[in-house]
Image (spheres, rainbow, N blue to C red):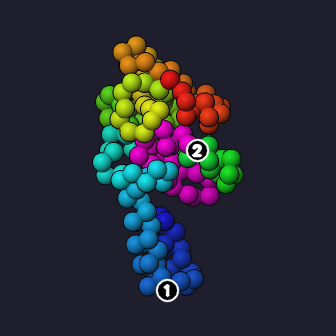
Amino acid sequence: MTNKAIRALAGGGIVTAAAIILVIVSFTSKADTCYMCSKPLASHGATLYHLEFTGGKEVTVCCAHCGVGCQMRMRNMEGDELESVRTLDYLTEKSINGAAAYYLVGSEEIPCCVPTVICFEEQSSAERFQREQGGKVYSLEEILRLPMEKLMKAG
């Protein structure tokens, strides 16, 4: 829950302060783990993937593998469309726009979940890493068109 949402609830007199605290504690404990696989987020700083969906829903997951799966799930099951995605370039750890990133799927490098999905800001970096570690490079648009079963067996 965002601070804006909490202020709106409190300001509108919809809930009590105790209820707001309960929601914050509940949300905070859930935000400490990946929305998809429940791995602790604190140990995945270099691979974190943050998504914002229409309607204000925000989700942080441990890696791009879970991020792509989350996007597919939200779109197919809940009807939510992606508004923005932020992640880190795997080599530089620079914050990048996930919608413009290049995704290396199924490499031998395993930073988190498998099959691996690793993000790069530059296509040339993704392709260079691919030559050394294997896998296949996709854009976000391309990877989201893959059937989930193919993504889970990619390489």
Q: Nearer the viewer, residue 20 or 32?
A: 32
Name the residue nearer the viewer: 36 or 84: 36
Crowdedness near tag 1: few (<14), some (14–19) or many (≥20) residues, C-alpha within 10 Å: few
Magenta stretch encompasses residue 64: yes
Residue at screen point 62% across, 58% down: 55
Q: Which structural element holds mark 2?
A: helix
Q: Is residue 128 magenta?
A: no
Spatial separation of the CA atoms under disc 2 and disc 1: 33 Å
Q: Does residue 109 sit above or below 30 in this rendering?
A: above
Q: Earlier in the sequence, mark 2 or mark 1?
A: 1
Which residue, given by chain and number where applicable, does mark 1 sit on? 16
20 or 69, which lies in front? 69
Q: Residue at x 42, y 78 (%)?
A: 21
The secondary element bearing badge 1 is classed as: loop
Q: Residues within 10 Å of mark 2 (few under 14, many from 20)?
A: many
Q: With 46 as the anchor, is 53 left or right in this view? A: right
Residue type indicated by callout 1: Thr
Of the pair 50 and 132, the residue shown nearer to us: 132
| Left or right: 79 in relation to 82 | right
Residue 7 showing in the rendered view: yes
- Position of residue 26 in the picture relative to residue 83 (left or right): left
Q: Which residues are magenta?
A: 49-69
Image point (47%, 26%), residue name? 106
Residue designated by label 2: 71
Q: Is residue 94 visible?
A: no
Residue 118 image offset from top left, x and y in percent: 43, 31
